[in-house]
Amino acid sequence: MAVSDHVDLNQFMEGVKKRNPGQTEFVQAVQEVAQDIFEFIDDKEEYHEAQILRRIAEPDRVVSFRVCWEDDNHNIRVQRGWRVQNNNAIGPYKGGIRFHPTVTESVLKFLAFEQTFKNSLTGLPMGGGKGGSNFNPRGKSDSEVMRFCQSFMNELFRHIGPDTDVPAGDIGVGAREIGYMFGQYKRITNRWEGVLTGKALEYGGSQMRPEATGYGAVYFLRNMLQHNDEDIEGKAALISGSGNVAVHAAEKFTEMGGKVLTLSDSDGVIHDPDGIGQEKIDWVKELKFEKRGRIKEYAEEFSGAEYHEGAEPWDFEADVALPCATQNEISEDEARKLVDNGVKAVAEGANMPTTIDGVEVFRDAKLLYGPGKAANAGGVAVSGLEMSQNADRISWNTEKLATMLEDIMGDIHEKTVEYGTEGDYVNYVKGANIAGFKKVADAMLAFGVV
Ligand code: GLU
């Protein structure tokens, strides 16, 4: 007989902190989930007995490896690479690769943990993983990036596979990097298989994959607004970031009749009171993806727009916000600014951009708040559809994929409302945590002690 005298939330979190010293991002991600899950499983002894949350919060494995490469000046450079395989109860590990100087084991563990819940919410058979390196692609030549990606794959290839673990892009990893890594995987293994997603269309990529995360976040935002008898038409948005997620969120928001006021990067923010419409978005895409420039150049190109060095989008007035940059960009102070600046709804295109204190501010103000694991799940959902197309050796058209993406985001919204409704308020964080947890937990119960 198991001892039914189970630990409470505080004891559980003390254990997580003790086992993961110094890993603040990971502890934060677990805490945000644990508070809702403890409430949900309070009267469900089987989840306690089987220690389900304790097991999900312990990655299946963390692989760490050296990545050695030569820069253009023939200096030998050494970076660290990781793949965190968090949980494969409901499908092969799935999640992006991040190349950024802020990458640590803690950051990747938090992302892999979040990914487990997010992937579950999509309804597709995907487990959770994440990988990356502290390599900074900024300022590197194409051949340096290629050599780094090839070296990274020389080690990563032995840990991944189309039925094992399927990485994709994330911050610092776009079509260029995926191309170099896929090419190297194919070269080493002599196998063409759907081992990475986010590939270009010529070699097995999916229509709608580049757009999916940003478009999906806007669909989720629209669904939250419609649930409250409102819509995007005529609303003004603050968007942070200027990468793939941010520009596609801006595109869909504009298409739905809204006005985008800001985009940003780690140096500052551009504020354009005329709105960042489709032509300007196309210009930003070229600036960022081809010229690899900085967002301040926008204000030199478009009169009427202002560049604010060191500022954040949250300093401006608007109706809604889409944080699409990185983790912890909205702490308590920024959350207050958003509320004071009139923002009524927030949908996260980035992963965990709001701190726990920031989330509390949103909740107290009864903001419509769609956390990343629900709102940005469109990207990985279309990755899942890319896997299906690769497995079947077919390509679906844009129309079919656009409909599937919109439907998946609608389903996620429905599930989060089902588990998150508290009187007249929808606690989307709780809804996402419980709906994401339940599917993984029930699969794990079926497997017994593994
Ligand atoms: N990096 C993205 C995310 O955070 C996409 C992952 C994927 O497509 O596998 O969900």
Image: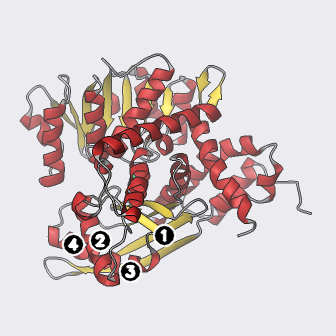
Tag shown at residue 181: 2
Dot 3 crowding, Cα within 10 Å, few <14, some 14–19, many 20+: some
Under circle 2, the secondary element is: helix
For marks 1 and 2, give the CA distance: 18 Å
Identified by mark 1, the residue type is: Asp
Identified by mark 3, the residue type is: Glu
Picture quadrant of residue 450: bottom right
For marks 1 and 3, give the CA distance: 18 Å
For marks 4 and 2, give the CA distance: 8 Å
Identified by mark 2, the residue type is: Met
For marks 4 and 1, give the CA distance: 26 Å
For marks 3 and 4, give the CA distance: 15 Å
Q: Position of residue 125 (x, y in %)?
A: 53, 56
Dot 1 crowding, Cα within 10 Å, few <14, some 14–19, many 20+: some
Q: Is residue 146 left or right of residue 314?
A: left
Q: Position of residue 149 (x, y in %)?
A: 28, 72
Q: Which residue is tagged 3?
A: 155
Circles 4 and 1, Cβ within 8 Å, touching? The answer is no
Mark with earlier residue (4, 1)? 4
